[in-house]
Amino acid sequence: MAATAPARPAATDAIDRHSAAPMYDQLRQLIIDGITRDGLQPGDPLPGEHRLCERYGISRTVVRQALAQLEHEGLVERVKGKGTFVSRPRTSEALVHTLIGLFDDVERRGGHVHSDILRHERTDADADVAAALEVPVGSAVIALERLRHVDGEPWSLSTTWMPDAVGAFTLDVDLSEASLYRVLAEHGIRATDGVRSAEATVATHDQAQQLDVSAGSALLRLRSISRDANGTPIEYFVALHRGDRSRFEFQLRQEQSQASLLHVDGDGGTSRAGTVSL
């Protein structure tokens, strides 16, 4: 009786068409294994869709499913017209659940923030700004618009409004390498409580150019109103953070943390549906 040939070891870099695992999930794992095996670093390019189709004998639909899953997991990033790249790790930010600013948040992690000052001037409060700062419409406020860079990379676009009595202290200060909150603290102005919210949005053409992303890319919009010890609003800001670079983490305690359920209507208005303890 002829000896039975030893079983051939399964290929470690091929799609197993007899496996119960979907082909796109197998490809996803093969790409992850390849990144590790080849020692690829953030920003390094990955094979294109056509090359992956040829290499593994699969359809472009399968390739796109695998890349979409990897992108959702934050492991790769796809840039229109350029290709697919190993993703840079997203930085956790404590900006939602604390009253610190981006400058201080990044600094305590050992990073560096630089701000391009796009606008820093005295202007009149429109209806939204007036409501947030609890001042009459048309009141003098200080507007500060900045393109923030973290470790040399465009990170967020923010516009801050302050009552004139607060923001006037900042007008002669170079805030490109400084913390706004520290400048205010030097004049005895400190935030003791406030409300912040985060919501999903997409980049307009102009925002995309400034943040070095594609138009329509995911952004996180952060809104904040900060108050001093007397309950007086001292700052209102709206910041757009790149969704591929940031994630917000919440630290919750059963005794202290609460969340309010807000319904957003088609016109952008909100109504409070209830408060729950977390």
Image (cartoon, rainbow, N blue to C red):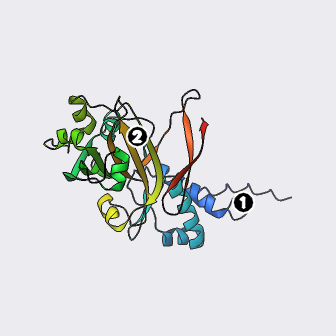
Query: In the orientation shown, which residue stands out farthest toward the top?
Result: 255
Question: Between residues 223 and 64, which one lies in front from this camera angle?
Answer: 223
Question: Between residues 94 and 145, which one lies in front from this camera angle?
Answer: 145
Q: Position of residue 39 (x, y in %)?
A: 43, 49
Question: Between residues 60 and 134, which one lies in front from this camera angle?
Answer: 134
Q: Residue at x 33, y 62 (%)?
A: 207
Above or below residue 259? Residue 76 is below
| For residue 213, side relative to residue 273 (left or right) | left
Amino acid at circle 1: Ser
Q: Residue at x 28, y 53 (%)?
A: 125
Question: Between residues 237 and 74, which one lies in front from this camera angle?
Answer: 237
Residue 238 visible to an observer of this rendering = no
Q: How many numbered marks have been drawn onto this rendered protein structure?
A: 2
Per the image, label 2 sits on a secondary structure element best described as: loop
Which residue, given by chain and number where applicable, does mark 2 sit on?
A: 95
Q: Position of residue 100 (x, y in %)?
A: 36, 35
Which residue, given by chain and number where applicable, does mark 1 sit on?
A: 19
